[in-house]
Amino acid sequence: MAKHDIMNHHQELRKQVEQQARRMQQAEKDRPTLIGQTIYIGTLGITFVLPVVGGAYLGRWLDSLASGYSIRWTVSLILLGVFIGMFHVYKLIKD
């Protein structure tokens, strides 16, 4: 009876070790690479910056149409671009 329990324990231990080894191999395979992380960070940066720069150019153009010195549209659209960029980055990270 004791020998049977030892054999069962040995088999159970072997299964657990094999399962853990497979998990470790899969984790090593799925580990993100440096270039993958760099591309991801770059994508986040572009996703944030493009609406801000677009808002600045559009605001500057609208302000140039107004008579006199005005930065109202430029500042407003830059701030709108910041909020849009933050929203897009949030959505990209969340998904």
Image: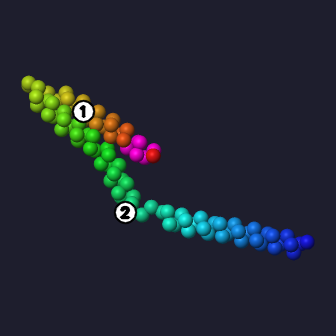
Q: Which residue is depicted at the point 45% across and 46% down?
A: 95
Mark 2 nearby-residue class (10 Å; few <14, some 14–19, many ≥20): few
- Badge 1: few (under 14), some or many (20 or more) residues near its Cα, within 10 Å? many
Residue lying at 30% horizontally and 37% vertically, measured from the top left: 82
Q: Earlier in the sequence, mark 1 or mark 2?
A: 2
- Hey, which quadrant is residue 64 in on the image? top left
Q: Residue at x 65, y 66 (%)?
A: 19
Q: Which residues are magenta?
A: 89-94
Circle 1/circle 2 CB separation < 8 Å: no
User: In which image quadrant can residue 37 be found?
Assistant: bottom left
Q: What's the magenta bit mostly, secondary-structure-wise?
A: helix
| Residue closest to the far right | 1
Q: Give the secondary structure at mark 2.
A: helix
Side of 21 relative to 66 (left or right):
right
- Looking at the image, how many numbered discs can be counted on the residues? 2
| Furthest residue in direction left, as rendered | 67
Q: Where is mark 2, residue-wise?
A: 35
Query: Looking at the picture, how far across and down is residue 25, in whole percent?
Result: 56, 68
Specify whether residue 95 is painted magenta. no
Pointer 1 residue: 77
Q: Which colour style is shown?
A: rainbow
Amino acid type, callout 2: Ile
Identify the image quadrant of residue 34: bottom left
- The image shows residue 87 at horizontal and vertical percentages of 37, 38
Left or right, 9 with reference to 62: right
Residue at x 39% of width, y 60% of height: 36
| Percent coordinates x, y for residue 40 in the rendering | 37, 54
Q: CA distance from mark 1 to mark 2?
A: 33 Å
Where, quadrant-wise, is the N terminus in this rendering?
bottom right
Q: Give the amino acid type for the residue marked by disc 1 in the picture.
A: Leu
Element type at marker 1? helix
